[in-house]
Image (spheres, rainbow, N blue to C red):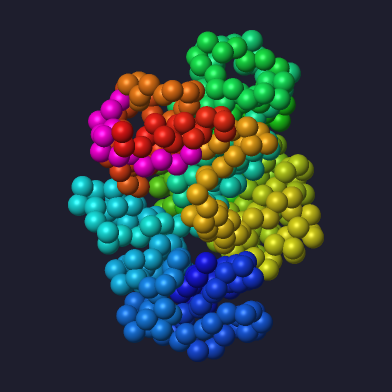
Amino acid sequence: MKIVIYGATEIGCLLATEFFEDHDITIIDKDETRTDEFNKLDISFIQGNASNIDVLKSADIKNTDIFIACTAIDEANIVACLSAKKYGGVRTICFVSRQEYKKTLNFEKNSENFCDFFIDYIIWPEELLTQEIFRIVTVAHALDVENFADGRARLLEYKVQPYLDIIGKKVKDCGFTKDTLMVGLTRDSQLFIPNGDTEIMEGDKLIFMGTSHSLDILAGTFFHKKEIVKSVAIIGGGNVGMMLAKTLEKLKIKTKIIEKDYERCQLLAEELSTTLVINGDGTDLKLLDEEEIGSADVAISVTNNDERNLLCSLLVKQLGIKRVIARVSKVLNIPLFEKVGIDIAISPKNSAINEVRNDLLENDVDILATVEQGQGEVLEINVLPEFNNKKIMELKFPERAVIGVVQRRNNIIIPYGETEIKTDDVLIIFTKAENAAIIKEFFKVK
């Protein structure tokens, strides 16, 4: 695969290092000076601005598979991606640092005026970091996790442990999280597709599909009762701190957030419902002790300064917190954090690299996923005009299958019986491998 990366930044270097052995990599950057890391790699380098058509021509953009813009300037990344899309028709991945850009760009793609002039995938690393921290805090290790639709939809598999409340209940009575569907169940090594009356037994393996966020909540609510987190202390009330607190509130986890800036505290107090907002310095040991931060189950330091996060983490460790998570801006600092005893050091840049890796895998193969040693398959099927406006309940499949996700432009829909599918929708369908060909044939023109 041919990949062009715009931006010789730390993220650009990480991406090139990750993919240069298996892919043809070209770096574009305004600065002629390259770091030693880049010079060690077998990649091409072009000096210039990627919003310039002549520079894109030099990079052979028309024969490129993926264009990734990851400079430190959001506007430059957006213009470069739009230029690459317009001229080369290439798949584009754009890094942004501001939430409003992601919202605006996704809105444009979702609007009725949708055209071919758009950015395929917008990555806001802080959002990915928030989601990853949330999973670390609340979600035990699943047996299997597969990502679809640019990571916004997932498949998750869990084993039913003997202490779970859902044992003996029918699927329809479990009250599983909104925007999730149970699509498969493995019992005695045999996979089948359940219905609402299927009774859940100890040792079953349950397979769910849904939005990434809803599956995080599902796992945190139903599948790890022995290690429930009841209280969390967050140091840093920036974007990550606020998004994390909002998500924890939904699970009714008692949350405190410490923020140094008074005006930011006022905003946090307006945005958050049950979180206790404390105006103070997270490096003040006296404050941490007075606010009983040491009694929290987990402490998370997510300021935008590595040195401050390290100091805050060490202080809360001194107060006796068993589990400490720290945000690390510079990836090279992660070993240092771990060496001095921080339980989990996590970088938004690493989260973003993982997301790009998933994207490359998803767009490089035809079969989305197989599960349970190949017994189940996840199919991706485009809806033809013959099925336009058909309700899910009206589709009489010749074999058992579940439409787990409907992707409409850039929207992710978790369907139910009354949901209508539209021409050009992309259906993500779960079925047994032996029935996959029959389900594919069902959706072909008759």
Identify whether 121 is placed above or below 21: above
Q: Is residue 441 above or below residue 48?
A: above
- The residue shown at (79%, 59%) is 340
Q: Is residue 133 left or right of residue 264?
A: right
Work out whether 92 lies above or below 404.
Answer: below
Quadrant hosting residue 293:
top right
In this rendering, would 110 be left or right of 327? left
Residues in magenta, as a range:
379-391
The residue that appears at 24% across and 48% down in the rendered structure is: 111
Residue 278 lies in magenta, yes or no?
no
> Is 445 displayed left or right of 18 in the figure?
left
**Rendering quarter of residue 347:** bottom right
User: Where's the C terminus, which quadrant?
Assistant: top left
Residue 61 at x, y = what percent?
Answer: 40, 74
Q: Position of residue 291 (x, y in %)?
A: 63, 41
The residue closer to the viewer here, 216 or 363, is: 363
Count of marks placed on residues: 0
- Whether 268 is drawn above or below 25: the answer is above
Q: Nearer the viewer, residue 393 or 155?
A: 393
Q: Is residue 281 visible?
A: no
Q: Can you see residue 114?
A: yes
For image coordinates 43% across by 62% down, the residue present is 93
Foreground pick, 94 / 200:
200
Considering every residue shown, the one lying at the far front of the view is 446
Q: Give the farthest residue toward the left.
A: 113
| Residue at (46% x, 57% y) in the render | 124
Residue 15, horizontal then vertical, whole percent:
57, 68
